[in-house]
């Protein structure tokens, strides 16, 4: 059957993106581990029917098969999968107060015990990426969704760091890259500060995330 040519970014949902990306890269029937299941938004009835999907999330309230910390892959899962999907938190944990708006953000992003600095978060991501590497068979694929967050008023180039680690430390071979545009993709109206003065924009507002596709060519 002929398929439309896939371009690098045009989806309205993560599930639609994953469906296209998996169709391009993963033969049907493959075993896939979603390392950070969350709400399961990467999956729809078609992808769940086409692949043998297993979910993991550290949050015990999430309805999925496993609840391990992605920094330590259980040994019985080593080399078990044709593909691994990894969508870790990309923001650091904010204030601890249960009543603050930080608390709801921490919960929404699954950050309750997460690192509080970009450096510590990057370390955690590296350990997670290492688990992804170990979970796939040789020639298996690792799909990593990430974004460049804003921290203390600055853009942080975490995708570059993650990509270097994947390629230099783990010797994963980057084979593709897709850009996902979030809802507020168009320019926003000018903003006003609390004192009524116009607020001055200091850097671009991020409205994309990136899906990186790697192959484990090295054992
Ligand atoms: C960005 S969300 C993933 C969203 C998911 N793709 C979805 O469709 O809803 C990150 C998820 O990673 C989980 N998580 C955070 N730290 C983790 C860890 N160390 N090990 C396993 N899961 C973790 C969180 O509970 C959260 O559900």
Image (cartoon, rainbow, N blue to C red):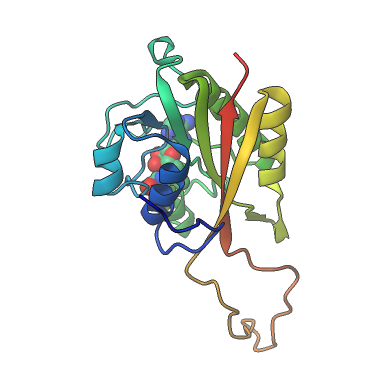
Which image quadrant is residue 196 in? bottom right
Tell me where residue 56 sits by quadrant: top left
* In the depicted structure, whether residue 99 falls above or below residue 118: below
Total numbered labels: 0
> Measured along the vertical axis of the image, is residue 128 above or below residue 178?
above
| Residue, far bottom | 196
Query: Residue 8: image x %, image y %?
Result: 56, 57
* 203 on left or right of 212: right
- Residue 85, given in percent of the width and then of the height, sits at 45, 36
Q: Which percent across, then down, holds residue 18?
A: 42, 48
Position of residue 3 relative to residue 51, above or below, is below
Furthest residue toward top? 75
Residue at 39% x, 59% y is: 13
Where does ligand 1 appear, by image quarter? top left
* Residue 142 seen by the camera: yes
State whether residue 110 appears in this view: no
The quarter in which the C terminus is drawn is top right
> Front-most of 6 and 9?
6
Percent x, y for residue 151? Answer: 67, 54
Could you tell me which residue is drawn at 37 percent across and 33 percent down?
57
Q: Farthest front residue?
A: 1
Report the side of 8 relative to 23 (left or right).
right
Which residue is pictured at 41% across the width and 23% down the height? 81
């Amino acid at each position: 059957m002929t398929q439309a040519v896939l371009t690098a970014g045009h989806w309205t949902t993560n599930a639609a993106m994953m469906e296209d990306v998996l169709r391009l890269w993963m033969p049907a029937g493959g075993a896939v581990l979603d390392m950070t299941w969350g709400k399961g938004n990467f999956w729809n009835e078609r992808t769940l029917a086409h692949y043998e999907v297993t979910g993991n999330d550290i949050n015990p309230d999430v309805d999925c098969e496993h609840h391990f910390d992605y920094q330590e892959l259980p040994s019985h899962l080593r080399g078990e999968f044709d593909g691994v999907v990894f969508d870790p938190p990309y923001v650091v944990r904010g204030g601890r107060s249960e009543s603050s708006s930080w608390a709801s953000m921490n919960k929404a992003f699954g950050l309750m015990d997460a690192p509080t600095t970009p450096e510590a978060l990057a370390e955690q991501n590296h350990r997670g990426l290492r688990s992804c590497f170990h979970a796939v068979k040789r020639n298996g694929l690792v799909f990593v969704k990430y974004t460049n967050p804003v921290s203390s008023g600055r853009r942080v180039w975490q995708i570059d760091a993650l990509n270097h680690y994947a390629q230099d430390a783990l010797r994963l071979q980057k084979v593709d890259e897709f850009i996902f545009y979030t809802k507020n993709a168009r320019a926003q109206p000018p903003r006003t500060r609390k004192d009524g003065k116009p607020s001055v924009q200091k850097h671009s507002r991020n409205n994309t995330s990136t899906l990186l596709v790697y192959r484990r060519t090295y054992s």
